[in-house]
Amino acid sequence: MRRNAGLFVGISLVSGFGSSAMSLVAGIWILDLTGSTSLAALAGLCVYAPVLAGPWLGGLLDRAPRRPLVIAVNLLLAAALLTLLAVRGPEQTWLIFAVSCAYGISYVLIDAGETALLPSALSPTELGDVNGWRSSAQEGMKLVAPLAGAGLYAWRGGHAVVVLSAVMPVLVALLYAVLRLHRTPPGRPARHCGGPRTGLVVLFGQRATRLPIVLAAVSIAMSGFTTAAIYAMVVTELRLPATFLGVLASAQGTGSIVGGLFVGRIIARLGPVAVGVAGTVLFAVGCLARCLPWWPATVAGAVVAGVGLPWTLVAAVTAAQTHTPPALLGRVSATANTAMFGPLVAAIPLGSAAVHLGARPPLVTAVVLCLTAAVAVFHSPPTPRGAASRRSPRQGYDRSAAPPGYCLAMPLSPDEVELFERSRARLEAIAYRLLGSASDAEDAVQDTFLRWQAADRGHVETPAAWLTKVLTNVCLNQLTSARARRETYVGSWLPEPVLAGDRMLGPLDTAEQRESVSMAVLTLLERLSPNERAVYVLREAFGYSHGEIAEIIGRTESNCQQTYRRAKQHVAAERARTEVDRATAQKIIAEFLTAANNGEIQRLVELLTDDVRSTADGGGKIPARSSITGAMAVAKFLRGLFKPADVKRDLVGGSPAVHIAAANGGPAVVVVIDDRVIGVMSLDVTPDGVAAIHNQVNPDKLARATRQWSATPHEEALFRAW
């Protein structure tokens, strides 16, 4: 993988040098030939205009083998560049425009092709880092190549630059040829799945890609909108020579290089949406700093904006790569480029007009728009994840019923829909045990459905096994990023509780199956590596053989046996539980709740084990004591928890009803106000008493429990607290 990462960075360096040098020289060459600045500016428009055709051009990358196509485009670009050797005077100016258009088309195809090839050559955890390094390499070439191209043009003329630029795509083609593509897509799309609509639906139909793309589009558009304003600030407000713009360009380029080097690690820790928000805010801060009448602030603003802008771009590209079925990456990547860079076509002339109001109004407008977008995304609620999966894909033929990311151009046959529906409950149960989140599990199953829809289903011999393999790998990718995000989680992290009767729980016939979905075990599984967790769940809860698991996760059978043994030993060492029958558990819980509500600390101590541990998850939104250990400490905490107080009633909106119920295959306490679940306390009941308490009060993790509670009958409350 390191070899491929180095090759991709090398590709960015070589291609960035050639394109940056030729882009500048094309305008200078036209200016020298015609004396017209307007015609010289049109060369840049020819380069960027083809990005608007991205959704159509990207479809080519999904219909043909991607690496050969990218290599061929590079070689054709080299041949097109060499035609500029025929330029001798103003009569051949049209040839420069034609080659500029060819450059623009090749940009769209090569950039989208490279984005689509990256997931086939790198692991998901490397994508963010390599995308950041590529960004730094390209920004570095923007600093070096224009100077080299302009110098060579002044020394030897345009033909020398043409030859140098033509060599670059040939070298790029050679680098693509030696890539090792270890990961292959799980099938190719049907031939009739074409057109721009597919890329748009996949890109904007899911929150994980839609939000980073929107943030990048806003930031990049504002960078074009403020170009004229920055010129005006330097020349009019700061009264500096126009050459100072070169200092600002270098400062912004330096910020982009530095930001690109670290953005991958930040994406791995926080996720693309959070990094997109941070990048947009940084760009806004940079614009605000450039409003100040002090040149050092202007330079500092350029550096900050330089860091923020590539953060939004890299976050968007990484999101598209990790949340798009491999068979659709070509058109989705090209559509993403159109969505991000297309608004520049309108933003630049609008900014040129707005600067007549003064240098600062366009900059302030950019600040307001960027911050508004960042705040809107930051506070946007998660997609109602259950909505799509609760709706049968059979309704997918209707546009309004299509699930997020549904590819309208590739309908499934009724038999294929039925096959997936028969597997849905099993897939959801596997995903929930792997992720510890019902909402994330629904997302993973919906992603699997999208991949099933995009695959060449006629060549799938065993659909059930294929679906399990795809789902497990989707979950493994999610676990890799989730582990990093949970390091910054506020307080203790607990799984999302699922009440009895929910198919997300899967089979609960045996003690092992009930154990595998319990809060205690799901919490313990967080300490395992993603592969250990997958092997343990598939073996312990669903009875897959080691040979079947090896096929699913791409390991050897002996490796899976060793992994399962380690995982089981780890879980057993942390948890030695003797199950009690339901009637006994309910009796102990009733006494436990009565004692807590009455403030009987001594009775609580008798009902708790000596080493009992209470853990609560408020997610930073509800006050919660993270962890308490020991019978007396937990008893005192429970007494305080159930003690009446006006502030508690004000916090939750009244006196909650306390019910004894079941969740995650075991006994639980459900606390409700007006059919709204405000807490689920899962209890680990043993013959010696209550051994563990897992109290989930994070409202984001109780939405599913609330829906289920309000939709199903339940017993009367034991009492009302407070």
Image (spheres, rainbow, N blue to C red):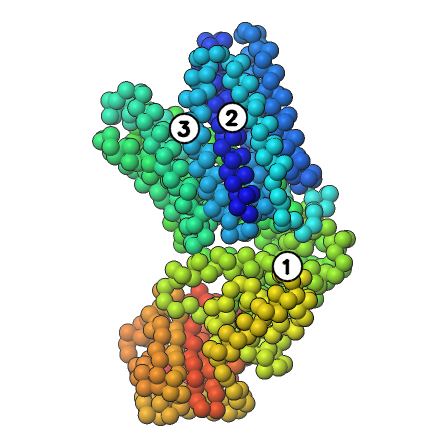
Q: Residue at x 48, y 18 (%)?
A: 25
Mark carried by residue 509: none
Q: Nearer the viewer, mark 3 or mark 1?
A: 1
Circles 2, 3 touching at the beta carbon (< 8 Å) = no
Please tell me in which quadrant of the rendered image residue 227 appears. top left
Three-letter residue code for mark 3: Leu
Sooner in the amino-acid sequence: mark 2 or mark 3: 2
Q: Tell me the crowding category of disc 1: few under 14, some 14 to 19, or many 20 or more residues within 10 angstroms, Cα based.
A: few
Q: Do we see residue 611 in this rendering?
A: yes
- Alpha carbons under labels 3 and 1: distance apart: 43 Å
Mark carried by residue 143: 3
Q: Tell me the crowding category of disc 3: few under 14, some 14 to 19, or many 20 or more residues within 10 angstroms, Cα based.
A: many
Above or below, comparing residue 361 to residue 532 in the picture: above
Foreground: 354 or 472? 472
Mark carried by residue 18: 2
Above or below, comparing residue 438 to residue 166 in the picture: below
Q: Position of residue 79 (x, y in %)?
A: 63, 21
In this figure, which residue is indicated by the disc labeled 1? 554
Q: Position of residue 436 (x, y in %)?
A: 51, 68
Q: Residue at x 38, y 47 (%)?
A: 278
Please tell me in which quadrant of the rendered image residue 77 appears. top right
Three-letter residue code for mark 1: Gly
- Alpha carbons under labels 2 and 3: distance apart: 12 Å
Q: Position of residue 562 (x, y in %)?
A: 59, 69
Considering the image in quadrants, where does the C terminus appear? bottom left
Three-letter residue code for mark 2: Gly
Foreground: 300 or 204? 300
Q: Position of residue 43 (x, y in %)?
A: 51, 20
Sooner in the amino-acid sequence: mark 1 or mark 2: 2
